[in-house]
Amino acid sequence: MTQTKLIKELEEMENKIKSGFEGKIIDIEETNSDTFFEDSGTYENKEGIGVTVEIIGENDTSFEQFFARPSPLGIQKSNIFLFKKKYGKYPEVGLTVKVEINEDGFFKIDLD
């Protein structure tokens, strides 16, 4: 691979990251944070759902995201509420969502 070809590929990847990705929800599973995060013990165990998203146009690329069940007082700041606000409904299989890469380099559903 020549330097020119490598630079072109890197620029294409960078543009793809800036423009964002789309994904399709392919699975939703009731779970808890200990099971989802493999009992990391970092957070208090919470009930919620694990959502699996397949990235459209990226071969066999998918990721999972956890949405904790919010308390009645905290619902408006919860990720699940932000999801409904952005997409007009709660997560469901087949729904197309915008996907971004977070500061750690991992995919996540765009909630902004």
Image (cartoon, rainbow, N blue to C red):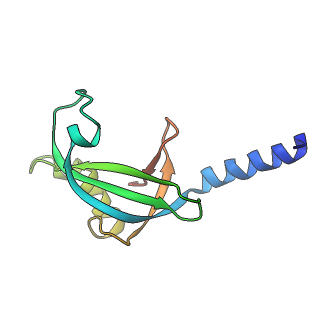
* Residue nearest the viewer, comparing 82 with 97: 97
Residue at the far left: name it: 72
Instruction: Identify the residue at image location x=9%, y=51%.
Output: 72
Residue at the spot 47% in from the left edge and 63% down from the top edge: 23
Horizontal and vertical percent position of residue 44:
16, 32
- Tell me the residue at 21%/37% (across/down): 34
In the rendered image, residue 28, in percent from the top left (x then y), is placed at 28, 61
Which quadrant does the N terminus fall into? top right
Please give left or right for residue 37 compared with residue 26 in the image.
left
Left or right for 107, reference 48: right
The quarter of the picture where residue 97 lies is bottom left
Name the side, left or right, on which 106 lies relative to 81: right
Pinpoint residue 103: horizontal percent, then vertical percent.
Answer: 50, 37
The foreground one among 63 and 97 is 63
Rendered position, 73 above or below 44:
below
User: Which residue is painted at 27% across and 29% down in the image?
Assistant: 40
Name the residue furthest top: 42
**Residue 84 in picture, x, y percent from top left:** 28, 63
Quadrant that contains the C terminus: bottom left
Total tally of numbered discs in the picture: 0
